[in-house]
Image (spheres, rainbow, N blue to C red):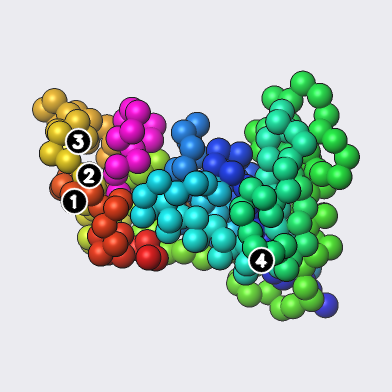
Amino acid sequence: MPRCGTVALAGRPNVGKSTLLNALVGEHLAIVSPKPQSTRLPVVGLLTQDDAQFIFTDSPGLLEPEYQLHETMRAAALRVIDDAEVIAYLHPAAEAPAPPLIDVAKLGRPPRAPIITVYTKADLAAAPPPPGGIAVSALTGAGLKELVAALRLHLPESPFHYDPDELATQPTRFFAAEFVREAAFELLHEELPYSLACEIDEFREHPAPVYIRATVYVERDSQKGIVIGQGGRTIKALGTAARTKIATLIAQPVYLELHVKVLPKWRRHAPSLKRLGYAV
């Protein structure tokens, strides 16, 4: 009987959840940034090996909320934990041992799913982590086979939920918006990427190239000027970087048109968050 189930990738911000997801599925799906809190919505990646299908869910980092967007991110992370068949609890190997997940997530009760402690960034650790966990490096691939084998033992017997050739469950327009944000994390500095959101206004696959029109929202007029840049240089560089990422994912040429608008205090405004796809 085949096995299939949801694996939650959970942990504090910047512990390597997105990098690990991408390494496990062999595709760049989730935003990767040295800056914490880049993941705002769960990203689902699929790995099908022989008779097992893993539905990996990269969740937002477990953080202390400072405003309403943070509240939605924390709520999304807790839902992923609650819905999982098995939880891969990530913690940097250099900071071992990992505190209990129930404390990090401030849960009222232990999760119903079994927890496997995963020590990430093992290539950066000076000493091996303590026993009871699996050390991995998404960059070198060390420990990934052992992790998949350990997770497989906890998957329920079930038919596959998705076609074995699929790598993701979310539509391409979702990843298009995410890659615009990833480019912003790469090109913009300090707090600005956190004040930026992206909404896809139009997505046409035919005729080629794929045509995408998107709006980049910021919170203040001064931020709009920074994102556009002198003579439009910054928004052009942002579009070029995002377009390259999208084209790589879908293996098709892409025409990306970006516009910048101000949506005041959208991170703290429930109707704006709902409009942008964040569950309030």
Residue wearing tag 4: 84
Counting residues from the N terminus, which is met first, the one under dot 3 or under dot 4? 4
Counting residues from the N terminus, which is met first, the one under dot 4 or under dot 1? 4
Distance (Cα) linking label 3 and label 1: 11 Å
Distance (Cα) linking label 4 and label 1: 35 Å
Type of amino acid at the residue the image marks with label 3: Gln
Quarter of the image with the N terminus is bottom right
Q: Dot 1, crowdedness within 10 Å: few (<14), some or many (≥20)? A: some
Q: State the residue lying farthest toward the front.
A: 108
Mark 1 touches mark 2? (CB < 8 Å): yes
Residue that appears at 25% across and 64% down:
271
Residue wearing tag 3: 223
Residue 66 is situated, as x and y percent measured from the top left of the image, at: 40, 46
Q: Which residues are magenta?
A: 185-197
Residue wearing tag 1: 263
Mark 2 touches mark 3? (CB < 8 Å): yes
Residue 58 seen from this side: yes
Residue wearing tag 2: 218
